[in-house]
Each structure stands twice: as C-alpha cells, then as structure tokens.
Image: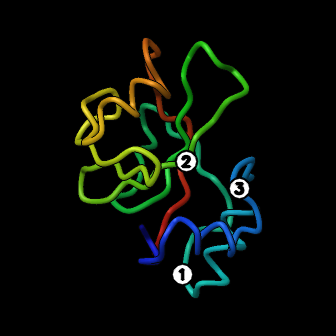
Amino acid sequence: MIAGITLDESIKVFGKRSGTYTKDVIAALQKLNISCGDKLIRITKTQKKSDYCMVVIRAKEFKRYEHWVVYKDGRYYDPAIGIANDLNGDFHDPIAYKLQWYGFERHETSYLPIH
C-alpha cells in the first residue's frame, strides 16, 4: 500500500509472509526507497501517531499477537482485509475482518512514521 506493490511482491521484498519485526519492516521500506523512522514510537495520551505511518495493533486478549496496518489521512489500510475509518470499525471486507478479529477489541500500541 505504501509502495504501490502487490502482496506477493511485498512478500518477496520482506522474504517472508508473516512474523515481521520492526527491523524487517524498516529494512523492506528502505529496499523500496521509502523514507521512514528508525524505530517505533509508543502511542500514549500525549504522543499521538503521525498522519502517515505504519501502526502496530493488538487485540487486548492476545498479548503476543501484533498486526501491522498503514494509517494515512485518517484511514486504516490493511492489505489483508481492507480499509476503515476506525480501528474497531467496519472494514470493506467485513467477513474476512470478523474471521481474523471476531469479538476482539483492537488498540494501537506504537507506530513507525513514514516520511
């Protein structure tokens, strides 16, 4: 979504389909000549996310499962399941979204700025 490439092309750049760490995301963005921050920034009451970034989200019930989404212009873009205006809202593919997150409240933990 950031680089304008397909999911398959993205997997080739990352070298894997899942289990990505922050260092993997930064390295992949740099390979694609996309400028980004060099570390995650924790989201707090006083530290809001930037207008264009990659956000780490987590379901409160799953302490060890995190998921990356793109945030731009007030919308969340998830290449796996669609686009939404609200993290806990209705994505364009609600069936896939409910299969992945059904019944779990999601929250943002941190973000990686995209420059």
Q: Amino acid at mark 2?
A: Trp
**Residue 21, image x, y percentages:** 74, 52
Which residue is at the front of the view, 87 or 38?
A: 87
Q: Earlier in the sequence, mark 2 or mark 1?
A: 1
Residue at mark 1: 34
Residue at mark 2: 68
Disc 1 crowd, CA 10 A, few/some/many (<14, 14-19, 20+): some
**Residue 87, image x, y percentages:** 35, 34
Q: Amino acid at mark 3?
A: Thr
Element on which disc 2 rests: strand
Residue at mark 3: 22
Which residue is at the front of the view, 15 or 62?
A: 15
Task: Compute the Cα span from label 2 to label 3.
Answer: 10 Å
Disc 2 crowd, CA 10 A, few/some/many (<14, 14-19, 20+): many
Q: Earlier in the sequence, mark 3 or mark 1?
A: 3
Task: Compute the Cα span from label 3 to label 1.
Answer: 15 Å
Residue 62's disc is none
Proximity of marks 3 and 1: CB atoms separated by less than 8 Å: no
Task: Compute the Cα span from label 2 to label 1.
Answer: 17 Å
**Residue 80, image x, y percentages:** 46, 48
Residue at horizontal 65 percent and vertical 81 percent from the top: 30
Q: Quadrant of the N terminus?
A: bottom left
Residue lying at the far bottom of the rendered structure: 33
Taking the image as shown, residue 3 lies to the left or right of residue 30, namely left
